[in-house]
Image (cartoon, rainbow, N blue to C red):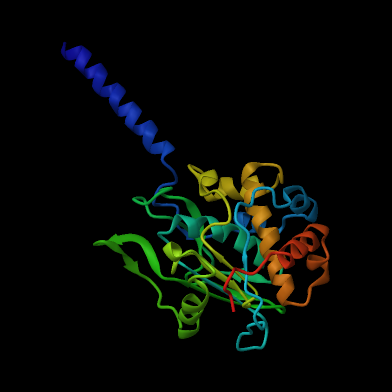
């Protein structure tokens, strides 16, 4: 009986270990983004973007079509508001980094993951906290509101939004642009007051159990489910940015898949009741 009990305990330990390894990346998946991952995100060839098209995109941006919002330097302004605990933010950062890397350069991005005790736990991602972005075509303003570390009933505060960022939330992260039940939801992305995105544009579950290295490597083949979702969303976000930059640079905005998505965005109806 003692021997049998020992076998049961060993089997239970093995099953528990297996479940833990399947649950997703560990909390140690943090730190500077390795150069090889950045290379995967910033060197996607046009043919792979064409392969991905937008077939993996579940939710298109919402048209705003106000006057182009510009940053301090006069360039069109893209604003991101999210938090490190948020799995939907975790998913949306991937295509956002890929899209914006077609127009400029990120520095000091960090590896991160969503909260371990939320839906889609430990979704592998990047974080904009402490990073910078330079581009001759646009400006990027990002804020990560909270960490992925729980503090009481919420998560530890990380950054405070600027008045301009809060104003965007109050103006466009509310009805009629989003349902009343989703007002104030993150991630929130504003592309120069032309288009907004609230929530993840694709199925977060596609990233379940994957590391940052695995996700980045999957972008080499535009036919994988992950590439169709991430690169497809990147194509749509790229088209939205091209709408704000007067289709510059031409080597990006002139790509067939980007032109197609820009036309698709232009055809979207504005929400009923929008100003």
The answer to whether 208 is drawn above or below residue 13 in the figure is: below
Number of numbered labels in the structure image: 0
Q: Nearer the viewer, residue 270 or 229?
A: 270
Residue 242 on image: x %, y %: 74, 71
Q: Is residue 141 above or below residue 182?
A: below
| Residue 83 visible in rendering | no
- In this image, 266 relative to 81: left or right? right
Question: As drawn, which residue projects farthest toward the top?
Answer: 1
Residue 175 seen in render:
yes
The residue shown at (77%, 54%) is 45
Tell me the quarter of the picture where residue 98 sits: bottom right
| Farthest residue, direction front | 273
Q: Which residue of the protein is positioned furthest toward the left in this rendering?
A: 2
Residue 141 picture location, percent across and down: 55, 77
**In what quadrant of the picture does the C terminus appear?**
bottom right
In percent of the image, x 49 and y 51: which residue is there? 124
Residue at coordinates 44% horizontally, 46% vertically from top-left? 25
Residue at screen point 65% across, 57% down: 233
Q: Quadrant of the N terminus?
A: top left
Q: Position of residue 229 (x, y in %)?
A: 63, 50
Q: Position of residue 84 (x, y in %)?
A: 43, 62
Q: Looking at the image, is 232 positioned above or below residue 225?
A: below
Image position of 34 (left or right of 114): right
Towards the viewer: 272 or 90:
272
Would residue 141 appear left or right of 264 to someone viewing this image? left
């Amino acid at each position: 009986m003692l021997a049998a009990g020992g076998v049961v305990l060993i089997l239970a330990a093995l099953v528990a270990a297996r479940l833990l390894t399947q649950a997703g990346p560990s909390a140690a998946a943090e730190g500077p983004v390795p150069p090889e991952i950045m290379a995967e995100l910033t060197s996607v060839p046009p043919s792979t973007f064409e392969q991905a098209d937008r077939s993996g995109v579940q939710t298109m941006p919402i048209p705003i079509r106000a006057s182009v919002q510009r940053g301090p330097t006069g360039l069109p302004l893209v604003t991101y508001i999210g938090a490190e605990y948020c799995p939907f933010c975790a998913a949306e950062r991937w295509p956002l980094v890929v899209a914006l890397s077609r127009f400029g350069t990120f520095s000091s991005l960090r590896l991160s993951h969503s909260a371990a005790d939320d839906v889609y736990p430990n979704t592998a991602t990047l974080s904009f906290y402490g990073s910078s972005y330079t581009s001759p075509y646009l400006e990027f303003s990002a804020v990560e509101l909270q960490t992925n570390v729980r503090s009481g009933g919420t998560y530890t505060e990380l950054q405070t939004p600027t008045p301009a960022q809060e104003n965007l939330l109050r103006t466009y992260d509310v009805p009629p642009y989003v349902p009343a039940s989703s007002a104030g939801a993150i991630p929130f992305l504003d592309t120069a007051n032309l288009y907004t995105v609230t929530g993840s544009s694709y199925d977060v579950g596609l990233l379940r159990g994957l590391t940052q290295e695995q996700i980045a490597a999957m972008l080499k083949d535009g036919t994988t489910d992950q590439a169709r979702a991430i690169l497809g969303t990147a194509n749509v976000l790229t088209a939205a940015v091209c709408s704000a930059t007067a289709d510059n640079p031409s080597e990006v905005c002139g790509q067939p898949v980007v032109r197609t998505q820009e036309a698709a965005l232009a055809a979207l109806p504005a929400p009923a009741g929008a100003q």
